[in-house]
Image: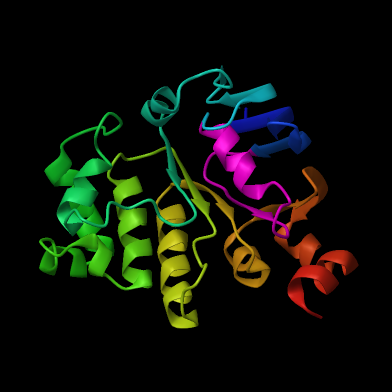
Amino acid sequence: MPLLELKDVHARYGPIRALHGVSLTVDQGEVVAILGANGAGKTTTLRSISSMTRTSGEIRFGGKGIARSSPEHVARLGVAHVPEGRGLFPELTVWENLRMGAVGAGRGNFQENAKRIVGYFPWIERRREQAAGTLSGGEQQMLALGRALVSRPKLLMLDEPSLGLAPTVVRELFATVRRLNEEGLTVLVVEQNATIALDVASRAYVLEVGKVAVEGTSDELRRHEGVRKSYLGY
């Protein structure tokens, strides 16, 4: 049984249809990527899973239907969502932002969980009293990731984590994602940088105008002519 399963999911924003029957699965322990151009429905897919967008169709997590759940309930079940733009509180300190990740969703002791996060990002301990809004873009993205991990999620969803970051920071960030996966965390990542997404993911889906256009293993997508031309540049 997949950890996450979407069947024929539709979503709209007012009169605009954003998803047209999206179906996908994510198995326990996988990294799965969702690729596509701007406006393809990638972000809406993650928002649908988090119950931040109203949908029709079936969404199941851990075998339970969550399509009509509240975002808070989905988070408590173990889904952590790092949105595009990071969603930090810029006026709060680094440590206060980290603590926000445990509110309503955290499992276990915050101090123990925070210690784990500092193991991934040691600079957090040194700069815990610094306002989050004064961090660099890369540091903010890592803090947003750390805040999501404080809740000890079963599924981590990342929306465009490489957006606006320097290549060295992107490599560091995805190295952490790979490490998390090796430690057992399931990851669903939306990413326009198809090359790095396929490097870290075992499978991927390509969305076009709200529909799944291509799906397969990362190796299969690297060999797919349309994917190569549109997303990999060769």
Residue drawn at 46 percent across, 74 percent down: 165
**118 inside magenta stretch:** no
Q: Quadrant of residue 141?
A: bottom left
Residue 74: image x %, image y %? 45, 27
The boundaries of the magenta stretch are: 26-50
Foreground of the two, 37 or 228:
37
Judged left or right of residue 93, residue 151 is: right
Foreground of the two, 154 or 161:
161
Residue 202: image x %, image y %? 64, 56
Count the numbered circles shown: 0
Residue drawn at 73 percent across, 51 percent down: 40
Q: Is residue 3 visible?
A: no
**36 inside magenta stretch:** yes
Q: Is residue 75 visible?
A: yes
**Colour pattern of the rendering:** rainbow
Please identify the residue farthest to the front as the structure is shown.
Answer: 15
Judged left or right of residue 210, residue 142 is: left
Foreground of the two, 139 or 120:
139
Residue 208: image x %, image y %? 80, 51
**Image quadrant occupied by the C terminus:** bottom right
Q: Quadrant of residue 135?
A: bottom left
Residue drawn at 21 percent across, 56 percent down: 91
Residue 163: image x %, image y %? 52, 67
Residue drawn at 26 percent across, 34 percent down: 106
**Image quadrant occupied by the N terminus:** top right
